[in-house]
Image (tube, grey):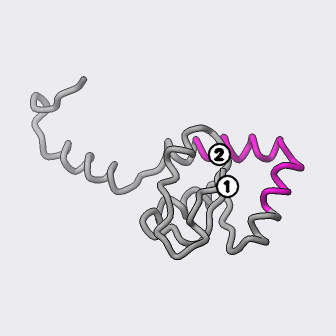
Amino acid sequence: MFLGSTLTDQDGHDPTGPGFLGKVLLFGPNMQKYKGLASHLVMQKGAVLVKNLDDLTDATARLLDNPALAVEMGQNTLRALKNYDGPIQNTVRMILEHLEKDEIYTL
């Protein structure tokens, strides 16, 4: 799945929604709001960073020519998202560390 506007000068899109569909992600360099997560996804081989339309075309062709690679990368995307220790998780952990055990509510 290509995350639109990431090849433009906009801030990009949140990759978690499409990532949890278990598909390989392709995005451009403009992921300012999600820089840490984008880098994590690329390092975990669940996403491809493309720099321009030619890169996007090449990456898309490579994945279409190799469906097994696309499936593997989609699985990597899911694993990377489940294991991502990002800012929200850090904040929740810090809050929970300062609550008494009987103050923690579960749904």
Q: On residue 45, which mark appears?
A: 1
- Is 71 left or right of 16, judged from the image as shown? right
Residue at 51% over, 46% down = 81
Horizontally, residue 95 falls left or right of residue 37, namely left
Type of amino acid under label 1: Lys
Q: Residue furthest top?
A: 107
**Residue 61, percent across and down?**
85, 57
| Label 1 environment density (alpha carbons within 10 Å; few <14, some 14–19, many ≥20) | some
Residue, disc 2: 76
Q: What stretch is highlighted in magenta?
A: 59-78
Q: Which residue is drawn at 31% across and 53% down?
A: 90
Residue 71 lies within the magenta run: yes
From the viewer's perspective, is 64 left or right of 83? right
The correct choice, above or below, for 25 with respect to 102 in the image is below
Asked whether 87 falls inside the magenta stretch, the response is no
Residue type of the residue flagged with mark 2: Asn
Q: Residue at x 50, y 44 (%)?
A: 17
Q: Position of residue 1 (x, y in %)?
A: 66, 50
Evaluate if marks 2 and 1 touch, with contact meaning CB atoms under 8 Å apart.
yes
